[in-house]
Amino acid sequence: MQFDLREFKFAEGGDTMSLEGYGAVFGNVDSYGDVIEPGAFAKTLAHHKTAGTLPQMLLEHGFSASPLPVGKWTEMSEDGHGLKVKGEILPTSEGKDTYIALKAKAITGLSIGYRPVEFEMRAKPEDPRRRLKSVDLVEVSIVGNPANGKARVASVKSADAIITIRDLEDTLREAGFSKSEALAVCGRFQAKTDRRDSGADAATVADFDRLLSKIRA
């Protein structure tokens, strides 16, 4: 199975941790020297539609701490740009960590896992290695370093999910903050949390986003 990377984004608001973007972009040479041509996903998407399924949503192609899906794709289709995908991240511990990293733009890539079905090899040295005419799409992963730089998350939809101060500290450290910087952010976030009527050691992702934006400004 081979991989190819793209871009995604979050859309604000709503009740779920959702994202959308392009799992693949047509006409762009990826790091493997391949080009995916329009229509390459037509047969595999038709097969999934008949079966009532969609390819899995994995984190780093299943090479993360858990090989289980980190979410589920709810829509996939081809348009003039590429393979457009929409999905929801599961409210598991790994899903929440992934969501926070996406919101912080610590990871921004999408990558497809596929088997080439029909393709043309290059005729000249300057040509792409292969032109993929048809592929069997197995999964679309959220990744840190996509093979195709144009495969990115375009939007992320906030869930009013609850995250703890310890969650924030761990996520900030993973995103590159020093321990002292992470503790400073968490201290400010805790102060905000303490002003809530609930008084719980938790707050929403949206609150964290607003605080982090102010710190980075």
Image (cartoon, grey):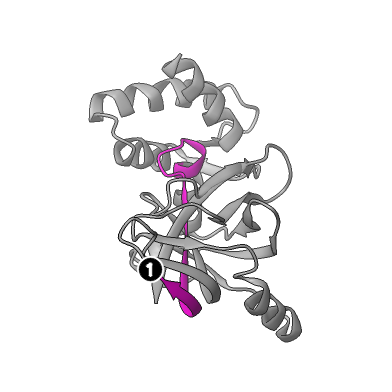
Horizontally, is 196 left or right of 105 in the view? Answer: right
Q: Where, by quadrant of the figure, is residue 127 drawn?
A: bottom left
Residue at coordinates 40% horizontally, 55% vertically from top-left? 30
**Amino acid at pointer 1:** Ala
| Image coords of residue 36 (percent x, y) | 52, 63
Q: Where, by quadrant of the figure, is residue 52 drawn?
A: bottom right
Q: Secondary structure at mark 1?
A: loop
| Image coords of residue 3 (percent x, y) | 41, 66
Q: Which residues are magenta?
A: 101-123
Of residue 187 and residue 105, the one placed in the foreground of this image is 105
Q: Kindly give the residue lying farthest to the bottom in the view shown.
A: 51
Horizontally, is 171 left or right of 50 in the view? Answer: left
Give the answer, above or below, for where 80 lies relative to 185.
below
Give the answer, above or below, for where 46 lies relative to 24.
below
Q: Is residue 53 visible?
A: no
Q: Kindly give the residue lying farthest to the front in the view shown.
A: 124
Residue at coordinates 65% horizontally, 28% vertically from top-left? 197
Residue at coordinates 49% horizontally, 16% vertically from top-left? 214
